[in-house]
Every structure is written in C-alpha cells, then in structure tokens.
Image (cartoon, grey):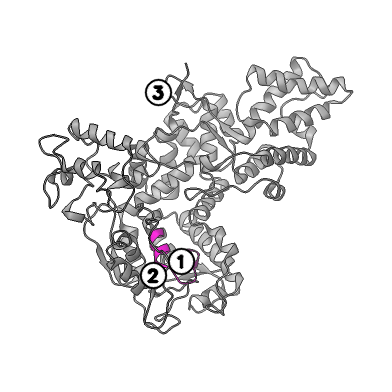
Amino acid sequence: MLATHCLECHDASIRRGGLDLSSEAAFQKGGESGALIADGSVDNSRLWQRVESDEMPHDRAPLSSREKEQLQQWIAAGAKWSLPDIDPVLYVHGTADPQLWVQRLTVDEYIETVRSAVGVDIAQEARELLPADVRADGFSNTAYSLSVDFKHVEAWSRLAELIADRMDILGFASRFSNQRNLSTDATMRKQVRAMGEWLLRGPLDDQEEVSFSGIATTVASAGGDYEEAVRYTVEAMLQSPRFVYRIERQRGDGDPRPPDPWELASRLSYIIWGGPPDEVLMQAAGNGELATAEQISGQVDRMLQDPRAETKSLLFISEWLNLNRLSSMRPAAEKFPGWRPELAADMQEETRRFFRDLVWQQKRPLRDLLNAQFTWLTPQLARHYGLEPKGDGWERYELQDVAARGGLLTHGSVLTLGGDDASMVTRGLFVLHDLLRGTINAPPPCVNTTAPPLRAGLTQRAIAETRIADQKCGVCHSRFEPLAFGLEKFNGVGAHADADRFGNPLREDGELLFPGTAEPVQFDNSGQLMQLLAESDRVQQSLTWKLTQFCLGRPLGAMEARQVQAIHAAGTQAGGTWQAMVKAIVMSELVQLCRTEVVE
C-alpha cells in the first residue's frame, strides 16, 4: 500500500514534508509534523488522520474502504514491517502468489518445437496463419498475454496438415517401431506410446493412449493403410493441448514440489533453447538422470553449447529493446531529410551483432552491455553516426577514441525510442524502468502532457527543466527526465551533434538518481553516464530481473525477491555472463520447484 500510494511523494529523495516512507527507520522517525503514530493509537496517528480524511494521497484518488480498513488494522497491530526497506517495483504486479501451470507456446516456440520434433520448417506459414503474439511487460512470451482464440485453433489444424504433408511419415514412424502393418493390438499401442512421448514431451496416460490408438482403428475400418494411420495420429498429436501448450501438474497439498523429470526437461529446454527437449535430455528424463544437481548442471552446460542457446538469447535482446518497432519507423522527412529506411534495419542488426559478439564470442559480463567500447556497423550506419566507414559490409568498430559512443544506450535502436524530438520523457522512462528498475505513477488525468514544440532558444532539456521545476509535475519528472540529460546530443534518429536543428547548443552533463537513494550522482558526459550504469549493482540486478522474467515467461514480484537475489548472487559470482546467469536461473528454486494447488 505504501509503495503504491505514498512513495511517489515520500521516498528517500523527494521527502515531501520531510517525510520518508521508504524504510522502517525513516517511518519511525516521521516528518516535519512529528511522528506518524503516537502511542500505538490509531486515533492519534497522523498517518491515519490524513488518510481517513482523504487528505492523502495528495492530488490522487483516495484509498478504498478496504485499503483504509487494512491500514487501520496494521496501525492497531503495531505497524510492524516485514522488510526493512520498500522497493516499489516489487509490488507493481501485486502480492499474489504466482501460479503458472499452463502456458501456450509462442509463435517462435511453436516453430522451433515443430522443427525439433519432426524436422519440418514451418516458419513462414506459421507466421502467416497464427495471430501474432502480444508484447506485454516487455516480452511476447508473458504468460497472461498468451491467449487463444478460434484463429489459433484453425491455424493449428491447417499447420498440422501442412507439416504432415512435408514429413517422411514412414521414416518418422521407423524411429519408434519397425512394423509396417496396420494393427490395433498392443503393437500399435506401443508405437503410439513411443511417438506420443516424443511429440508431447512426456509419457501418455492411459486415456491419451486409448484415444490416439483409436485413430488407427478408425483408419483400418475405413480401409486405410498403416501410413495413413500414422499420418492422422501425428496430425492429432500436433494439435493436442500437450503439444501447443506447456502443461504441468498443479494438484498437490499447496506446498512446492520438485517437477517430474519430463516437466523439468521441458523447463530446461524452453528456457535455454526456446524449444523442446532433444533426445539426450528425453533419455535423461526417462532414465532418472535429472535427479541430482550435478546431473542437471551437466545437462545445462551441454545445452548452453548448442547454437539454439545463442538463438534464444538474441530473442531476449530483440524483445527487451523492442527492436521490431524499427521495422515500421517513419521519421518526419522535413526533420530528417537524409534518413533512409535501410538505416532502421541496420540499427536492429547492429544491436544483435553487438550482443552476439559480447555475449557469445567474448563471453563478457552482461553489465558490459552498457559501456563496451565497440560496435558493428555498415558503411551507411557508420556515416550516420559520424564515423569514417570501412569495408563494404558489416565491420567491427573500436570506440575507445569515440567519446560519444559505446554501449547499448548509444545505439540507434535505443535512441530512437525517444521519437522524432528525442523525448527526454520517453528516454528517461526507459532508463528508469529497464535499467534502474524504478517505478512511476501515471500523470493525473487533469495534467496536460503535450510538450511544447522545440524552437530557437528552447531545447528538450530546457523543456524538461521547466517540468521539473513545476510544483505539480516535478515530483515525478525529477525522477526520470534527468536520466536522459546525458543523451541530449543524440537526435531522434540516433545521430550525434553539438547543436540541434535550430542551432541551440546541447549538453550531456547531468545527474543520476538510483532508486532508494537520497542524493543523485553527477556525470559530465554520456561516457560517464554509461560507466555509472555499468558499475551500478542496481542496474546489474535489473538485468538479472529482466532475464529471469524472460526465462520464466511471467512478471516477478515480492514473492520471488529472495530467489532472484540468490540467482543474482550465484550468477555474478560465476562471472555475470549470459551463460552464468541462465544457469543460475535454471538451478534456482524458481525452476527446480513447482507450486501446487490444493484440490478439495
């Protein structure tokens, strides 16, 4: 409640009325008006009086009756804190116990699952027929956004036919049985059992075995042959919920349980590869060789050497930075007459190549994404950045002597987030949300959020400073707009200059306020800004949170804070690389334990 309603004005940096509610110690101290709670009495509590009268939250909707009742009970019980400090981001998604037992495959996961399972590339048709996945909370694999409608059902049916058409049905069947006779006896059931275990990523239960074997009976009664029976069985399995969903058992006593070997194998493979377990992992699951930490660790090390692990990592950087938005980027021609659409594609690829080089070739810590002194450019993108082109295609550029460039924030793919006018609001919010893991409330409905146009004598920074100085706007804008001050010399399409198109001189000095701290840190230029970010433990933890969310496919909150802290510590101790962090995630309680639901 404090995180949601109070910290906007009463955290360690803002302290309206001298009041800081972000820690238990500061809460007990009170503000300029004195202690918040007197003698443990609700009626004498300044906090309760202000809230009960709707005086607080100021300029915001009052607390609900239920919230007021909870606050009253909390004060009456002694106002005890469960944590010494409040990190507001932990409560963005509420405090409910996360429960995720059924998760639809994303389009990318479906394509990779088909390719790995039956050797058919269905990418083009799948992207044409399946509805596009919706990006939510920064990623398109976020479970709550993976809905299913009739278009999905129709597409899976059509795709199953196309896949079967392209398969060598008899060759596929021979992987599981040498027989060629259509039979409905135990021999056919054995074949169905083996195929089902492979395609559906785990053993069939009795009912599933009977249902899929019944397809052979139907084919035989209609005069069909063995190949037809296998084909229709495969088509049915490709449309089965167990193929297009990742399903785990939720029934239990309410306590966490270890996943069964098949569930664990799928967790590992979809986290590391974005696709199903391979034969080695399936055999390990079937032979009980995923029972110890050493066995699991060995499989993870093996899987991280597979090219599919690199492919999955590139999906992370594309999703996190929303690189696909550049495909539809259309900057105003009157502002950027030299813009070419090809530059947008180059910017996307620059970030992917930079990431691949740092993460997979050099195996550097993820924090170096913020300040690494190199990049990959085409001649046209080099010229756009003001660098001397070299070669005819993609080339690696060292940036030690290029003060303005180095790290993700200086990539065109990120700088263009600010739009044509290089909005400090949008850029600052990106740094706040995606690097500092900070939070900010939406502006009140009465506030005019339309920014004044730039002109001679008026820069983006000047506009931002006016908002920050405003009594109503400044309490929020002071948290994030200064985060973009160091990027002012980069225009809306990522080019660097000392003056804007109106001739206004631009600056790159500023200050950086890390969430939970009271005093900002000064920087003189963008290079110092990148260095501060890369060295910040808060930023490094943010990268861990982002990666963990991507791996699990759901937002994280207060319930997972302890586990994510353990992941961060383990991964950092092992080098902080992509490989180390992913291994720390899959070896953590978040993957090695399943939550259960009590069924009456």
Identified at 52% across, 78% down, the residue is: 335
Question: Residue 434 appears in which quarter of the rendering?
Answer: bottom left
Q: Main secondary structure of the magenta part?
A: helix
Q: Residues within 10 Å of mark 2 (few under 14, many from 20)?
A: many
Task: Give residue 84's position: percent from left, percent from top.
Answer: 21, 41
Looking at the rendered structure, the kind of residue marked 2 is Leu
Nearer to the camera, 504 or 340: 504
Looking at the rendered structure, the kind of residue marked 1 is Gly
Query: Which residue corresponds to mark 2?
Result: 487
Q: Nearer the viewer, mark 3 or mark 1?
A: 1
Looking at the rendered structure, the kind of residue marked 3 is Asp
Which segment did they paint magenta?
411-430
Question: Residue 409 appears in which quarter of the rendering?
Answer: bottom left
Magenta-drawn stretch contains 414? yes
Magenta-drawn stretch contains 346? no
Query: Which residue corresponds to mark 3?
Result: 255
Query: Which residue corresponds to mark 1?
Result: 418
Q: Nearer the viewer, mark 1 or mark 2?
A: 1
